[in-house]
Image (cartoon, rainbow, N blue to C red):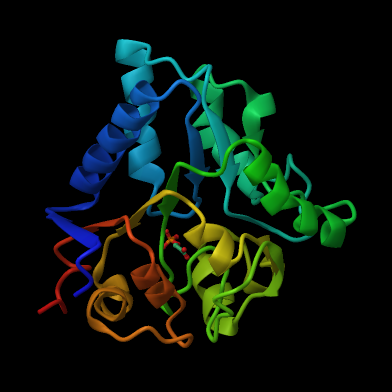
């Protein structure tokens, strides 16, 4: 195991959300201008729910926070219910006092190529991501960096592999509606973050977590690139941890 990787095993998805949201709150309270990297999908939902509950109870100030999201499906407008902009607004941003002008999500309808080329520069201009929240795919993808992943990649247009399209079809009425392309921060963009928290729950993530923690660095498991980073916290439930030594 990589000594720079800290593993925290929690009981279930609720505890995962509680633990992760507390780390995010401690982080945003500790910096004058925190730059957060955010993720979508089912895994971070409980984290965002706890952050919203915290805001309702404690009014934690988000007005100074800047955020960058990892990815967006190609071709969906911002008000499309399947877009990641919609997800972030609906699950988190609409319920806290973050300035939406400071929330960045890759734009997927415009000149996407040139937008992709600018995204890493935009992050850099805000000082770089201090804390990146990541989910993980069953195939070990991080962001939409599918295997085999280019560990030198920056933000770009990517093709989704059939297993990801199938996994994500649960959010759509039919599998044909799932976009087959996305714009995603690259592996190198992710590794540029100063600190990374990767979260996972459920048995279907156990193999990817085993590769991440115990496997060798290998582009067929994109998550293993994180072993080259010097500050990664992996927070997982017991099921996702079930194959670890
Ligand atoms: P999930 O997706 O949280 O919906 O499982 C994670 C991912 O694919 O990165």
In the displayed structure, does residue 110 sit left or right of residue 119?
right
| Direction right: furthest residue | 111
Frontmost residue, 62 versus 216 = 216
Residue 14 picture location, percent across and down: 22, 44
At 33% across and 77% down in the image, what residue appears?
208
- Residue drawn 18% across and 44% down? 15
Assign ligand 1 to one image quadrant.
bottom left
Asked whether, in this view, residue 145 is left or right of residue 222, the answer is right
Quadrant in the picture for residue 61? top left
Residue 150 screen position, x and y as percent: 59, 79
Q: Observer-nearest residue: 2 or 207? A: 2
Is residue 180 among what the camera can see? Answer: no
Q: Residue at x 56, y 65 (%)?
A: 188
Visible residue check, residue 218: yes
Q: Quadrant of residue 177?
A: bottom right
Viewer-closest of 128 and 237: 128
**Image location of residue 55, percent across then percent down:** 38, 18
Give above or below for 133 relative to 7. above
Q: Residue at x 64, y 44 (%)?
A: 123
Rendering coords of residue 35 (x, y %):
51, 35
Query: Is 229 positioned to the left or the right of 70 in the image?
Result: left
Q: Is residue 41 above or below residue 158?
A: above
Quadrant location of residue 74?
bottom right
Quarter of the figure with the C terminus: bottom left
Query: What is the quadrant of the N terminus in the image?
Result: bottom left
User: Is residue 53 positioned above or below 159 on the image?
Assistant: above
> With respect to residue 28, does 225 lie above or below?
below
Number of callouts: 0
């Amino acid at each position: 195991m990589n000594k720079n990787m800290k593993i925290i095993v929690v009981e279930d998805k609720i505890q995962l959300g509680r633990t992760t949201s507390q780390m995010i709150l401690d982080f945003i309270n500790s910096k004058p201008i925190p730059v957060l990297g955010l993720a979508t999908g089912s895994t971070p939902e409980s984290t965002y729910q706890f952050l919203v509950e915290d805001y309702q109870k404690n009014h934690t100030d988000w007005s100074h926070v800047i955020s960058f999201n990892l990815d967006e499906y190609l071709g969906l407008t911002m008000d499309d219910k399947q877009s990641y902009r919609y997800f972030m607004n609906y699950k988190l941003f609409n319920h806290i006092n973050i300035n939406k002008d400071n929330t960045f999500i890759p734009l997927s309808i415009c000149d996407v190529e040139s937008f992709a080329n600018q995204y890493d520069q935009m992050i850099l201009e805000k000082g770089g991501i201090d804390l990146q929240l990541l989910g993980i795919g069953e195939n070990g993808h991080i962001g939409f960096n599918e295997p085999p992943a280019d560990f030198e990649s920056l933000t770009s247009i990517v093709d989704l592999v059939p297993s990801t399209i199938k996994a994500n079809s649960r959010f759509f009425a039919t599998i044909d509606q799932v976009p087959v392309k996305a714009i995603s921060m690259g592996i190198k963009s992710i590794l540029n973050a100063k600190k990374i928290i990767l979260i996972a729950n459920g048995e279907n993530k156990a193999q990817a977590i085993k590769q991440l923690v115990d496997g060798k660095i290998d582009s067929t498991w994109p998550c293993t690139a994180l072993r080259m980073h010097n500050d990664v916290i992996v927070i997982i439930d017991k099921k996702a941890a079930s194959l670890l030594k």
